[in-house]
Image (cartoon, rainbow, N blue to C red):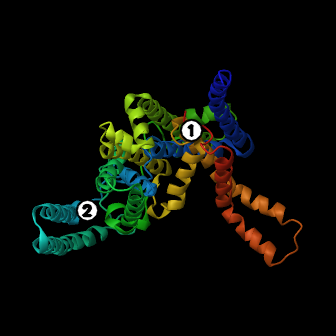
Amino acid sequence: MSTHQPSAARGGKIRAPLLFAVMAVLIGFEGMTSGWNGAIGILNMGLISAILALGVNMQWGYAGLFNSGVVGFIALGGLAPVLVSMPPTPGAFAAGGWQILIGLLIAVAAIVLAVWLNGRLAGKARVLAIVAVLVAGFFIYRAVFDPAVAAVQAINPSALGYLGGLGLPVLLAWPVGALLAAGAAWVIGKTALGLRSDYLAIATLGIGEIIVAVLKNEEWLARGVLNVNGIPRPWPVPYEIDLQGNAAFVERAAALGLDPVTASTLLVKLLYTGLFVAVLGLLLWAAQLALKSPWGRMMRAIRDNEISAAAMGKNVTRRHLQIFVLGSAVIGLAGAMMITLDGQMTPSSYNPLRYTFLIWVMVIVGGSGNNWGSVLGGLLIWYLWIKAEAWGPQMMDLVTANLSEGALKQHLVDSAAHMRLIVMGLVLLLVLRFSPRGLLPER
């Protein structure tokens, strides 16, 4: 027994560096075989995915909270660069922007008044008062809100048609994205965290879909499915066209044997890599400190046995709300970073398969409860998700090489597009079978 434990500890210490080294080799191999532009692009989205997995791991790995609406918090974070960094639409606030804000305040006031009446009245009087307040508030809200929205959306609808933003630096939008997601998490948590855990899963699922639906349909806010393009880049990331017009940069690129287009794209992606590594490193440092602190031990004690923790005087619901808000803030931060990297806001791209299920696969495969495992899972699963799209047709061509032309061969070839899902399911099954606690299990 005494000889086994040190060897197991040494194995655990070696496993993490070894797996991260394998991940580095995969990225390096991708760069040497398919080009460094693609490899660094995979790395950048992998870093953002690692931050997303880190946020979900805070909720699930620390406290056992199942968030099935991750996509909604990502979407809220993605809204922040639009609201903060895009220039304001000329004439939008004069046409109806202030009226839209007044309409939203009326709706909030009606809900607050209904909640207040619910706690002050009883019996039929309470029901009648709440119904009257909500119905009256709805009609007043629509009377104020609808004409204002029509006026804003009529302003150059082919290119604008929305309020725009504040025109501030995009780096400021990242913490704002975290705050938007944290605010939504607080509202959901105050409602659902006092109930059974399955109610939280249902609530987050529903709220996530509602948030995405609002972003798709409210064109005055972020142009809906028309998308917002041209989101500014963060400092110090330049635009490729500016670099290509810089004689000194072109000369240095030529000295390295690179054409200006390739060199400018590589530099931009590497600068994004530096920003994302800095943010991930800061979050990982803070998460590790928190996990090893008395607060982290308390959260894991609550996760493992809520009844015992409550008997020890711990406010379980309050701590659950705390970690749920913190995890959602990290998810919202990653959502803002993702939109900044893309340079556009596309609400129709937010789907639960990509932005909820895949993030959960990253956490499970990496190792829930282990921050380093979440980072590894984010990088590895994103790499496999991207490469599976290219591997699918190649594998199907190999499988069907000796088949005669017909319905079966055509069906298999058409199924190549679903190879991503097959690969993700296969990876998840293999990890759960041979390493059920993940590649880097919680100690």
Say which quarter of the image contains residue 301.
top left
Mark 1 Cα within 10 Å, few/some/many (few <14, many 20+)? many
**Mark nearer the viewer, 2 or 1:** 1
Where residue 272 appears, as percent x and y from the top left, is 51, 39
Say which quarter of the image contains residue 296.
top left
- Is 176 on the left-hand or right-hand side of 417? left
Q: Is residue 161 above or below residue 345?
A: below
Residue for point 69% across, 45% down: 434
Element marked by disc 2: helix
Residue type, label 2: Ala
| Residue 230 seen by the camera | no
Numbered mark located on residue 218 in the image = none
Residue type, label 1: Gly
Residue for point 65% across, 57% down: 425
Q: What residue is disc 1 on?
A: 373
Where residue 64 appears, as percent x and y from the top left, is 45, 46
Q: Marks 2/1: CA distance?
A: 47 Å
Where residue 266 appears, as percent x and y from the top left, is 60, 40
Q: Nearer the viewer, residue 244 or 203?
A: 203
Q: What residue is disc 2 on?
A: 92
| Residue 341 seen by the camera | yes
Q: Nearer the viewer, residue 85 or 103?
A: 103
Element marked by disc 1: helix
Residue for point 40% across, 58% down: 204
Q: Is residue 400 above or below residue 366?
A: below
Quadrant for the N terminus in the image: top right
| 2 or 1: tag closer to the N-terminus | 2
Where residue 145 appears, as percent x and y from the top left, is 22, 70
Q: Farthest residue in the bottom direction?
A: 407
